[in-house]
Image: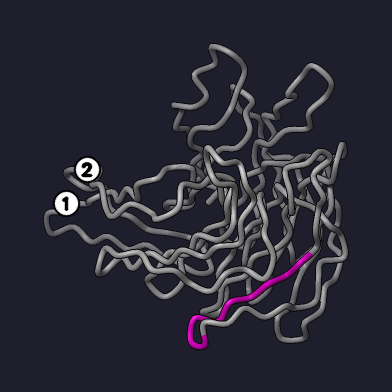
C-alpha cells in the first residue's frame, strides 16, 4: 500500500461474492496472490477512522489494519498516532503512539510485527528526513526502536522478502535517491544493495516470485513534477537491477498490487488531463 498513502477517511472493503469459487489472498509478506474471478463485486463502507489523515503508513498484521502517523487534514499537523482497525468486528481502537511524529514513512509487516521506517518529522520546509526504524509487536503493544537505516529519507518504499526488509528509493530535501538498504531483523543489521537505476520518490513496489518490482514515482524539478513511467526489477539473489518496461501515462503516488503474478497499478498523480487518478493498469504475467 502506498504504502502507504491511505487518504480516505472511511475504510472501504471490496465484498467478493464468489458463488462457490475460492478466493485466496496471501498477506505477509505480500508476494503472489491468487484470486478467482468473482461473479459480483461491490464496495462496502465500514466504520470511519477516528482521525482524518493523509500521508500516513499502513499495513495489515494478524487480521488487523494499522494506520500509523501522518498529516491531519485541515489542521496540517504531523502526528504520531496509531489507529487499529479490526476487520472482524468493524471497529477502530487507539494503539500505542509511534515514538515520534512522522509523515511519508513506510510500513511493512514481517513475521507478525509491524515496522515503520523513515519519513519526515515536520511540515516546515525543507522537511527533515529521518532514518528511524520502529517496530510494533502486537503481542505486547509496545514500540521498540531498532537499528536505524543508514540513510535518512521519506517517501520511500519498503517491502518484505524472505525474512528481510528492503528499503528502496525515497527522498531527502531537494534530492531523490537510488538507495537500497536491507534490514535483517534477526541480526538487527543493515546492508546495502545495488542502487536503483532511476532516482525517485513516491514510488510503488511489490514482490513477485523472487523479484522486487518498483514502478512509477517522481523526481520534481523547478516548475515540473517530473513523473516517471519506469518499471524496474531488483533481484535480491544476484543483487542486480533490470529495466522491465514503461507505462503510459507517467505518474506518481499510485497503489501497486499483485494478483496471479500480474502487477496492477492503480490511480496516482499524472499530467493534467491524463486521467491518471482513475487508471487501473496491469503488466503481463511476470516471474
**Residue at (52%, 65%) from the top-left corner?**
82
Numbered label tally: 2
> What residue is shown at x 66% (from left), y 30% (from top)?
246
Q: Measured from the top left, where is residue 36 in percent x and y?
A: 28, 53
Left or right, 16 with respect to 211, comes to left
The one nearer the camera, 2 or 11, is 11
Q: Residue at x 82, y 73 (%)?
A: 190
Report whether residue 198 is seen: no
Q: Is residue 15 visible?
A: yes
Question: SS class of the residue under badge 1?
Answer: strand
Q: Mark 2 to mark 1: distance in Å?
A: 7 Å
Disc on res. 254 = none
Image coordinates of residue 63 in percent, x first then y, are 37, 71
Residue 95 sits inside the magenta stretch: no
User: Relative to 227, does residue 187 appear above or below in the rendering?
Assistant: below
Q: Secondary structure at mark 2?
A: strand
Residue 87 place in picture, x, y as percent: 31, 65
Left or right of 54? Residue 148 is right
- Give whichever of 155, 233 is nearer the camera: 155
Disc 2 target residue: 41
Q: Residue furthest front?
A: 75
- Residue density around tag 2, few if under 14, some if 14–19, many if 20 or more, within 10 Å: few
Q: Is residue 257 left or right of residue 227?
A: left
Q: For residue 132, which quarter of the picture?
A: bottom right
Of residues 282 and 203, the one drawn nearer to the viewer in this rendering: 203
| In contact (CB < 8 Å): disc 2 and disc 1 | yes
Residue 260 lies, with reference to residue 275, above or below; the image says below
Q: Which residue is mark 1?
A: 17
Tell me the magenta residue range: 132-140
Q: Position of residue 153 (x, y in %)?
A: 80, 53
Amino acid at each position: 500500500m502506498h504504502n502507504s498513502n491511505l487518504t480516505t477517511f472511511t475504510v472501504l472493503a471490496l465484498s467478493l461474492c464468489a458463488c462457490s469459487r475460492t478466493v485466496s489472498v496471501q498477506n505477509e509478506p505480500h508476494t503472489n496472490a491468487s484470486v478467482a474471478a468473482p461473479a459480483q463485486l461491490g464496495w462496502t463502507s465500514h466504520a470511519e477512522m477516528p482521525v482524518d489523515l493523509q500521508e500516513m503508513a499502513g499495513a495489515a498484521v494478524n487480521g488487523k489494519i494499522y494506520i500509523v502517523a501522518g498529516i491531519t487534514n485541515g489542521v496540517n499537523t504531523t502526528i504520531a498516532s496509531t489507529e487499529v482497525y479490526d476487520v472482524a468486528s468493524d471497529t477502530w481502537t487507539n494503539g500505542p503512539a509511534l515514538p515520534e511524529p512522522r509523515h511519508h514513512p513506510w510500513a511493512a509487516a514481517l513475521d507478525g510485527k509491524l515496522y515503520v521506517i523513515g519519513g519526515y518529522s515536520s511540515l516546515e520546509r525543507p522537511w527533515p528526513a529521518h532514518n528511524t526504524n520502529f517496530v510494533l509487536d502486537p503481542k505486547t503493544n509496545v514500540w521498540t526502536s531498532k537499528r536505524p537505516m543508514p540513510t535518512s529519507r521519506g517517501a520511500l518504499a519498503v517491502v518484505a522478502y524472505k525474512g528481510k526488509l528492503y528499503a528502496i528509493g525515497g527522498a531527502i530535501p531537494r534530492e531523490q535517491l537510488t538507495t537500497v538498504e536491507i534490514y535483517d531483523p534477526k541480526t538487527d543489521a543493515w546492508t546495502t544493495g545495488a542502487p536503483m537505476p532511476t532516482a525517485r520518490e513516491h514510488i510503488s513496489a511489490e514482490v513477485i516470485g523472487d523479484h522486487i518490482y518498483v514502478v512509477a514515482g517522481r523526481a520534481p524539478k523547478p516548475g515540473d513534477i517530473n513523473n516517471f513511467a519506469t518499471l524496474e526489477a531488483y533481484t535480491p539473489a544476484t543483487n542486480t537491477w533490470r529495466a522491465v518496461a514503461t507505462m503510459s501515462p507517467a505518474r506518481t503516488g499510485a497503489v501497486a498490487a499483485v494478483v496471479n503474478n500480474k502487477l496492477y497499478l492503480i490511480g496516482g498523480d499524472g499530467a493534467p488531463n491524463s486521467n491518471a487518478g482513475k487508471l487501473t493498469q496491469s503488466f503481463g504475467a511476470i516471474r
